[in-house]
Image (spheres, grey):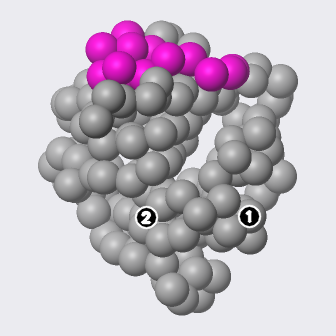
Amino acid sequence: MNDYRDRIARSAPEQIRVGVDRDRLAGLDQLIAACTGFSVFDLGCHDGTVLSAFARAGASPLAGCDIHTPSLGRARERLPNALIFYHDLIQGAPSIAADVVLYLGVHHHLIEQQADADAVAASAANGAAKYMAVRAPIDALDAVHTLALNAGLTLWYDDHTSRVVSPLRVYRRSQRNE
């Protein structure tokens, strides 16, 4: 596992970047439009591209974590009012509580590193008060689907149109009785 972290730390940002900005935002328009005034937590926020789109739509407050320090610097520049911090998801999920939780392009990397990817995904699903977005290869997406349903989320929509980034599924939580 240390070898993986070392490779990430030494890599140039363009080597770990998935698609261009518009590809990373593929399929998220409907969710972004629904989230004005909602808090958003992005697990694996990279350079803040996706969080920035939520900020432009009026989502607040914003938080994100990633393992790649140079990308975190760019995220902090893009989002000076957001809480952006280093966190290695291989060690487990940070405390998650937000209206919207983004889990985009993370799950399969955790599996590759023999981390407890399901525990991180379950934490993401349980921490999502209103919505959770997941982007992953289809086999990993199916595994997270079960975890999301077990956390009380229902599938809102999915998007498999991008040929550059993995498929997307967006879940929402039914109204809770309070």
Q: Tell me: 145 left or right of 53.
A: left
- Which residue is at a point 28% across and 52% down the rendered structure image? 96
Identify the image quadrant of residue 126. top left
Q: Which residue is mark 2?
A: 64
What amino acid type is highlighted by mark number 2? Gly
What amino acid type is highlighted by mark number 1? Ala
Q: Which mark is residue 57?
A: 1
Q: Is residue 154 magenta?
A: yes
Residue that extends furthest to the left in the rendered view of this protein: 91
Q: Which residues are magenta?
A: 145-158
Say which element carries label 2: strand
Identify the image quadrant of residue 158. top right
Q: Tell me: 62 left or right of 92.
A: right
- Residues 158 and 118: in front is 158
**How far from the left and from the top, in percent, is residue 102?**
50, 46
**How far from the left and from the top, in percent, is residue 89?**
27, 49
